[in-house]
Image (spheres, rainbow, N blue to C red):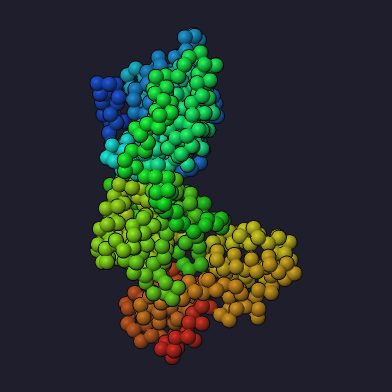
Amino acid sequence: MACEFRGTVEIAAARERKRPHGAGRDPGKADQLRPSAHRERGDDGVPITAGATGELRVPARRLQGGFVELNVLGQFEVLKDGVVRTPSAPKVRQVLALFAMNVNRLVHVDQLVEELWEHRPPPSAMTTVQTYVYVVRKMIRKVADGDARLLTVPGGYVFAIDPAALDVLHFARLADEGKERFKAGALEEAALVLQSALDLWRGPVLSSVALGPLLQASAMRWEEARNAVLYQRIDVDLQLGKHAELISELTGLVAQRPVNEGLQAKLMLTLHRAGRRSEALQAYQRARTALADELGVEPSVQLQRLHEAMLKSDPSIEAPAGASTTARAAALPGPPRLLPPDIPLVAGRDEQVAGVSRELRSRRIRPAPPVVVVAAAPGSGKSAFCVHVAHLVKATYPDGQLYARLMSPAGDPVDPKDVLGGFLQAFGYPAGDLPPSLGGRARLWRSWTAERRVLVVLRDVVQFEQMRPLLPTGAGCATLIASRKLLADASLTMGIVLCPLDRRESRRLLTGVIAPRRLEADPGAVDELLNRCGGLPLLLRAAATRLELRPHWPVRRLLPPALDPVGLPAGTADVLASVRRTYTAMSLGARRAFLAAAAVPRTSPRALADGLGNDEQEAESLLDELVEFQLAESSTAENGTGFLYQVPMPFRAVARSLRDQDGSLSAMAVSAPLA
């Protein structure tokens, strides 16, 4: 099902012109949600200047992409919207890899020849290089769609792309950030950031590419950089007293690199500080044997001095004063992982998942953290959608993933002060040290998230003001919102509406659980079931689960009279509760309008005004509120003037139950004829 993207300006415009909700629009217009960025078209003369080092400075507007990812830390991957688009031809892949390792820098033609054939180029080398470049350029144009260009410049080529698209440069940025936090004395933060940099590695650099001399040199440089980050992170963990965790890791590393004296020294020191002195001395003897057998040398002076210090129990090699002990380190809370368990999504949501994941994974430089709103009708699975996406992108937010509901089971709003208290305690703040006021907690939250990468998932949001204090402020953070209505605020960077599943997708959901032969046995009953479920995944899943648990039942057993008290397939209490919470969140006038509109197949503002005793303009405003809360749909009237509104069938059944419960509204007129 094509999702409907809306930005803040677009939502406001839709309300202003009373555009029919649910009307078709091109999903490709999702780019309108982001700040507009002029895209260059080809080699169009945009100035590209060369610095003294040969690095070409590409105008910033060229680097506004973020949709294409180039991954070189492992197998070479070109990803477009999460789909692998790496060329299969080995030489073309090698040429593209060389461009990727030199983004926004001049790659001379001679360098291409050297990389491909080293010192033995064929007579046709220049022509062949031009052919490979043509194929690469064609692929880039097709895949990047304007977010990257392969430019021809005097002497060679420039692959112009946002540097954030390349994982190895993201690694370098994290490595630098980790070093800065280490210098500032923020050891736990430094360890977390440095490990985040290491987590980007999936294997040896460009492991799926045949490496010529230039790529081989680049790969070796980055492998050395990785080792430097690894060793620094180990040093930080040593200062934090995380000996138990380090022993296992260092033992494995030493087994792979037995003549690496730096790793041997770290293993010896870790064992010594963990109180395993005899094992530390044995580690030295193994290191000495390995060095003699493989290199024919004795251990270095530094390693021998460490050995002597251990023999003498020299206090200088003990943990630094003030460093955390192992127990202390174990007691410190790690990054909170508060997401509920992930569940497979229903069919028909792939496009929306890819779009939201791309927005949250993008490494492009942002002026503010992304805030994505997912709106949908009750029972559409918007909360499950957000949780699923959060699990997909959680590696992008290593400092923590938080989750909170902003509405109680009874439908009452949750105090954001209490939510902030829970967030801050999850990060280790004692409850007794928290500021008592919402403002104080919000300031502490903003300060804490300013330099971190945290993902916040909020569900059951009705008003933006309720969640504003919960937004993290760091540019590396993000907020994903499951909302009961469309929200409009300048802070939003992306909006998406999960529409009900169409008939094909609804049937596909059923066949994913129920054997097709059971559905084919009574197609009329299946059609009626689909009508009553209205394309809501939660209702469809409940019906399919009930049939799965009762394999002897025909589909017709889920239809009248074997329905629950409100006329829906039995086992749909979650959907009923969700609709009731949405109903409670609406204004009193919107509640009356919902009950009235649900009593007829469809209505108009004039008909509703006659039934409720309101004027037509007020009735139209109430109906629009129902549309915003995803409890009604609108369409253009047949005569082309005005709009008609209808409440989907599943919600009409719930409305009958609500009308019986709400005595204050039970006596109102609900049967006004259509205009």
Which residue is located at x 39 percent, y 67 percent?
406
- Identified at 48% across, 68% down, the residue is 378
Whether residue 128 appears in this view of the structure is no
**In front here: 366 or 467?**
467
Badge count:
0
The percent coordinates of residue 573 (x first, y second) are 55, 74
Quadrant of the image occupied by residue 415 = bottom left
Could you say where residue 329 lies in the image, as x and y percent from the top left?
A: 40, 47
At 34% from the left and 17% from the top, the residue drawn is 155
Q: Front-most of 262 and 632?
A: 262
Q: Nearer the viewer, residue 33 or 186?
A: 186
Residue 479: x, y in percent?
37, 55
Q: Position of residue 224 (x, y in %)?
A: 41, 25
Q: Is 666 situated above or below 428?
A: below
Asked if residue 154 can be seen in this view, the reply is yes
Q: Residue furthest bottom?
A: 667
Q: Quadrant of residue 551?
A: bottom right
Asked if 495 appears above or below 531 in the picture, the reply is above
Name the quarter where the C terminus is drawn. bottom left
List the single residue furthest toward the front: 312
